[in-house]
């Protein structure tokens, strides 16, 4: 079990909020007789925003556990029947998300934060070390990634999802007041559910091993490897495709008789429409961040299997 032990700031520590009499502190420049320096004005604006976030956060009940994405919420619920707070909301992209002051306050007031290996988490963990050094962070739940890997969506691989759940279970059992037997029972139930979904997905995709499906954002690499498929992505290295790459994608997709393009709700691109028109292809939504992880793995398998179809050609990945 790996914890990063960090201190939860008592009373939110250095957070700017109401004074001891319940009144907001006021800062004015009236006695100076001239405008405040730009740096001071910026500081005042920042403190006002942070104070507003504090008041809004204080009005909501604090959650014991905070997770990065919705799929983790299902795991925590299965393991300890607790509702975890999720940082990434519907339609938000983990690639561009950053925490608001309100979200930071929600994290530092929790007992446990569970990351999953997304890009924003590195800087977030550095900030948390500075402002809440006693906050527990379940670093053992961060999956290892091959050097240079750009796809952090490991939870779409059922085996990786189970490893993540096991790491979360170890962290939960270390929390005061948690019943280890109940956590272990919840873990066993979650694993069984994921295994059933994995078996059904494998059966669906078995006839299509070696086939290629087309996506805009490359979020399904772990899923593809688990079920012996190939992912062809329109987006390249986190950037919109160049004209040259779009032409390459169109040519490859034609050779593979691809007739569907998979997109995520939080990603939109004119390139998808242009390629879809060139291929006379249908645009289909796949959501790697859906909260119902066990069901979503099977749902993704069903949509990908359907995209191959009976008349889709051999669809083998090019050498």
Image (tube, rainbow, N blue to C red):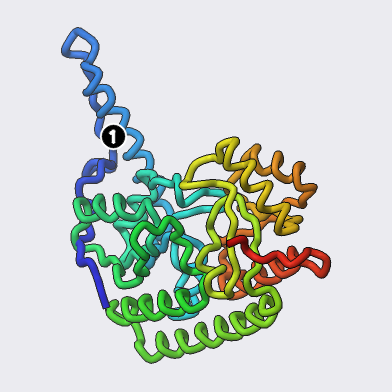
Name the residue: 52% across, 76% down. Answer: 158
Pinpoint residue 60: horizontal percent, then vertical percent. Answer: 43, 55
Quarter of the image with the C terminus in it: bottom right
Q: Is residue 177 left or right of residue 248?
A: left
Residue pushed farthest left? 32
Q: Nearer the viewer, residue 229 or 140?
A: 229
Q: Which residue is mark 1?
A: 47
Classify 86 as above or below 138: above
Q: Nearer the viewer, residue 177 or 23?
A: 177
Residue pushed farthest right? 311
Residue 311, quarter of the rendered image: bottom right
How many numbered discs, if any? 1
Pinpoint residue 220: horizontal percent, then vertical percent. Answer: 55, 62
- Please rate how many residues cluster around mark 1, counting C-alpha atoms within 10 Å: few if below 14, some from 14 to 19, many from 20: some
Pinpoint residue 253: horizontal percent, then vertical percent. Answer: 69, 53
Quarter of the image with the N terminus in it: bottom left
Residue pushed farthest top? 33
Pinpoint residue 235: horizontal percent, then vertical percent. Answer: 55, 46
Please say whether residue 64 is visible from this viewpoint. no
Please say whether residue 222 is visible from this viewpoint. yes
Q: Nearer the viewer, residue 45 or 267?
A: 267
Name the residue: 82% across, 70% down. Answer: 310
Name the residue: 31% across, 69% down. Answer: 138
Classify 193 as above or below 124: below
Name the residue: 45% across, 75% down. Answer: 160
Q: Secondary structure at mark 1?
A: helix
């Amino acid at each position: 079990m790996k914890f990063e032990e960090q201190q939860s700031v008592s009373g939110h520590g250095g957070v700017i909020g109401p004074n001891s009499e319940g009144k907001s502190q006021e800062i004015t420049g009236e006695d100076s007789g001239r405008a405040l320096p730009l740096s001071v004005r910026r500081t005042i604006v920042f403190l006002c925003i942070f104070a507003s976030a504090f008041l809004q956060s204080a009005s909501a009940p604090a959650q014991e556990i905070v997770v990065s994405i919705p799929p983790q919420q299902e795991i925590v619920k299965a393991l300890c029947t607790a509702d975890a707070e999720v940082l990434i909301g519907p339609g938000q992209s983990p690639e561009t998300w950053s925490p608001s002051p309100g979200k930071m306050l929600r994290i530092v007031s929790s007992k446990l934060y569970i990351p999953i290996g997304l890009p924003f988490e590195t800087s977030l963990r550095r900030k948390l070390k500075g402002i809440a050094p006693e906050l527990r962070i379940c670093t053992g739940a961060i999956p290892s990634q091959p050097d240079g890997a750009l796809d952090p969506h490991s939870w779409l691989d059922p085996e990786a999802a189970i490893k993540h759940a096991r790491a979360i279970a170890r962290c939960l059992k270390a929390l005061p007041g948690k019943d280890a037997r109940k956590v272990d029972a919840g873990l066993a139930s979650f694993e069984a559910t994921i295994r059933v979904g994995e078996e059904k997905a494998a059966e669906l995709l078995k006839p299509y091993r070696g086939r290629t499906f087309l996506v805009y954002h490359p979020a399904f690499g772990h899923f593809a490897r688990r079920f012996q498929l190939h992912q062809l992505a329109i987006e390249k290295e986190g950037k919109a495709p160049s004209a040259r790459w779009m032409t390459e994608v169109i040519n490859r997709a034609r050779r593979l008789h691809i007739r569907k393009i998979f997109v995520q709700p939080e990603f939109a691109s004119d390139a998808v429409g242009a390629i879809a028109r060139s291929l006379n292809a249908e645009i289909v939504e796949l959501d790697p961040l859906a909260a119902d992880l066990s069901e979503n793995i099977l749902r993704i398998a069903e949509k990908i299997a359907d995209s191959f179809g009976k008349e889709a050609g051999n669809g083998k990945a090019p050498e």
